[in-house]
Amino acid sequence: MTQKPSLSGVPLRELEIVLSPLPRYRAGQVFAWINSGLDSFQEMNNLPFALRRELDGRFSLRKTTLVKKFEDEGNLKLQIAVSGGMVEAVILVDRAGRRTACLSTQLGCAMGCVFCRTGLMGLVRNLDSAEITEQFYHIRKFYPDIANIVFMGMGEPLLNLYELRRALEVLCRTMSPRRITVSTCGLVDGIEGLASEGPSVRLAVSITTAREELRRRLMPVSAANPLPRLKEALLRHQAQQRRRITLEAVLLGGINGGAEDAAAMSAFAEGLDVVVNLIPWNRVEGLRFEGRPLKEPEAAEIERFRSGLERLGLKTVIRRKKGRGISGACGQLGSTVDKDFDVNGTDTVAR
Ligand code: SF4
């Protein structure tokens, strides 16, 4: 049986074409319902009954299925089945109680950063706009009050720019672009594409270290996107978009938190308006760097690096360790977990 085409994740201007010759206001009504998270045509109660039935016969509203929910101290991770595998979306809550939805853009990832569990999976495929936006709709069923969205889940968003842009066109109808951040491992072409053509969302770059030689060993992406070119792209992006950029540094115990790293970071940041987000690495079993197991940084090491950066004039934020119990922290997506909850919130497994 052939699958009905899905209308979720379809930007309004495309929906108007798909639904023509229906008048544009009807497309607007359908779009608003879909973007509110509704997954049934029957409930679109401002449409005539015959139209609801017709749409139901021609289209679907979901391409994905929520399979499991994992919970730890208010943080939540959802496993969502897509064709060919399982993607993960995470909700993180900060000290002020604000919730951020962390969404995935690819099934797996080809970038191979040595500290990342998703990188071990390799790339299966890009997600389409429906599969990206539906992560948000699944999340909102549990938490309607999401304050921010970050594209920092599985995959490299800028390698899926076409579908990411479509998803952003949809999501920006419900959330201000100022509250949406796209995080990249540093792809120069993608950053330049965002700078020149938008959309004008916030940008975060996973820099990890600004020592080129070390960065190449930790993040293979750096070979084709060296730091001088990355810096030029960021300068252009900032000149066009006029937004502060976040430099993310995943801190690996004993590897990238020394005085040399602080000095290199300061030199890299010169001329840019940035904040450095220090992310203490979360342990993932089996990840090694040049034959040695990776270690979590100690509290003193994190503090030393932070104060070193601040002395050099950089603004820093240390990311509170969040979502570790559910393997929902940075670099842990795609792994197994300690505690499983089914979608009804019942504790089902303790491995
Ligand atoms: S850190 Fe991001 S870009 Fe690097 S392997 Fe993991 S998901 Fe991919």
Image (cartoon, rainbow, N blue to C red):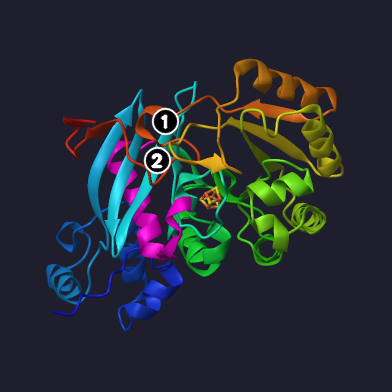
Amino acid carrying label 2: it is Val
Q: From this viewpoint, is residue 126 visible?
A: no
Location of the N terminus (image quadrant): bottom left
Q: Which residue is mark 2?
A: 90
Q: From this viewpoint, is residue 196 visible?
A: yes
Residue toward you, 294 or 68: 294
Q: Residue at x 36, y 23 (%)?
A: 73
Q: Quadrant of residue 23?
A: bottom left
Amino acid carrying label 1: it is Gly
- Give the mark nearest the N terminus, 2 or 1: 2
Among all residues in the image, which is located at the extreme bottom? Answer: 21
Q: Is residue 140 above or below residue 18?
A: above
Q: Label 1 crowding class (10 Å Cα cut-off): few <14, some 14-19, many 20+? A: many
Q: CA distance from mark 2 to mark 1?
A: 8 Å
| Residue 70: x %, y % from top left | 29, 35
Q: Residue at x 45, y 43 (%)?
A: 102
| Secondary element at tag 2 | strand
Q: Is residue 79 shown in magenta? A: no
Q: Is residue 77 above or below residue 51?
A: above
Q: Is residue 273 above or below residue 347?
A: below
Magenta-colored segment: predominant secondary structure: helix
Q: Which residue is mark 1?
A: 323
Among all residues in the image, which is located at the extreme top? Answer: 300
Q: Is residue 213 left or right of residue 120?
A: right
| Residue 256: x %, y % from top left | 70, 34
Q: Which residues are magenta?
A: 120-145
Q: Is residue 27 above or below residue 297?
A: below
The answer to whether the residue labelled 2 contacts the one labelled 1, judged by CB atoms less than 8 Å apart, is: yes
